[in-house]
């Protein structure tokens, strides 16, 4: 692929900007500077540097982010900073079909909710992970205001009725892991679902953290506000094709 097209596909600016970066000697491929935007470059295992920033070529972007509290999962936040400001500019500028550029979060977490968030520019992957019919399990660590009782756990497993749907909504799994702590697994994605389910059994969510999506757990060494690329086998595992390896 032409070098200027590679830079454009990775989000380093418009085609004109990308051509200019190359012509001005700001791009290194391997050990040397390349100044011809039309240089044909092999994509296999490609790593390059733009203005001192090292980058690995990815045809599609698949990321995990440890969402910190006090951030919004919105491109146009109303009160708190956007999670997208935690990402490098190229990931926010990657060309995409439609009006929105860059990677998109798969689902949303409230501003006060922390934990694992997936982002991608692959529309099919977004649909696969977000579609209710695929029942992708999400695990939440819940800090409750009041002591958790076995009766509350049983009711969450049996199903509770929320005010916008007469059909009971039930947890796929639920266990008390402390006097005021629950580990709750859901396969649906209703608005404020965990908070509303806890309220339905007479308790209240004080803290909420998502620790797992499907087979993928939030790594212990990924601090709040940090992100990393998903490995190919992790993407495959999230789509149910192979067991997750890490």
Image: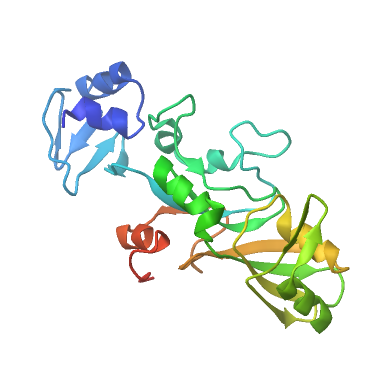
Whether residue 115 sits left or right of residue 162 in the image: it is: left
Position of residue 201 relative to residue 166, above or below, is below
Position of residue 81 relative to residue 151, above or below, is above
Q: Position of residue 7 (x, y in %)?
A: 28, 30
Q: Residue furthest front?
A: 166
| Residue at figure coordinates x 38%, y 69% from the top left | 244
Q: Position of residue 8 (x, y in %)?
A: 30, 28
Q: Identify the image quadrant of the N terminus.
A: top left
| Residue at figure coordinates x 50%, y 61% from the top left | 222
Of residue 76 and residue 126, the one placed in the foreground of this image is 126
Q: Position of residue 225 (x, y in %)?
A: 56, 52
| Residue at figure coordinates x 17%, y 23% from the top left | 37
Whether residue 55 sits left or right of residue 66 in the image: it is: left
Q: Give the mark count.
A: 0
| Residue at figure coordinates x 70%, y 39% from the top left | 80
Quarter-of-image position of residue 140: bottom right
Q: Position of residue 53 (x, y in %)?
A: 33, 39
Residue 110 can be seen in this image: yes
Quarter-of-image position of residue 157: bottom right
């Amino acid at each position: 692929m032409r070098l200027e097209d590679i830079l454009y596909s990775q989000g380093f600016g418009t085609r004109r900007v990308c051509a200019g970066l190359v012509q001005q000697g700001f791009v290194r491929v391997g050990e040397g500077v390349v100044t011809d935007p039309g240089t044909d470059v092999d994509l296999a295992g490609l790593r390059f540097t733009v203005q001192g920033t090292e980058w690995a070529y990815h045809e599609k972007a698949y990321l995990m982010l440890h969402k910190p509290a006090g951030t919004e999962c919105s491109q146009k936040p109303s009160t708190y900073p956007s999670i997208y400001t935690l990402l490098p500019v190229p990931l926010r500028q990657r060309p995409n079909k439609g009006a929105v550029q860059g990677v998109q979060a798969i689902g949303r977490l409230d501003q006060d909710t922390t934990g694992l968030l997936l982002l991608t520019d692959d529309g099919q992957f977004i649909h696969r992970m977000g579609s209710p019919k695929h029942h992708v399990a999400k695990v939440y660590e819940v800090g409750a205001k009041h002591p958790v009782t076995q009766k509350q756990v049983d009711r969450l497993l049996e199903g509770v009725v929320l005010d916008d749907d007469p059909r009971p909504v039930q947890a796929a799994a639920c266990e008390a892991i402390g006097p005021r702590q629950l580990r709750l697994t859901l396969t649906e994605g209703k608005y404020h679902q965990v908070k509303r389910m806890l309220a339905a059994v007479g308790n209240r969510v004080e803290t909420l953290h998502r620790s797992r999506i499907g087979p993928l757990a939030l790594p212990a060494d990924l601090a709040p506000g940090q992100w990393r690329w998903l490995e190919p086998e992790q993407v495959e595992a999230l789509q149910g094709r192979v067991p997750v390896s890490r």
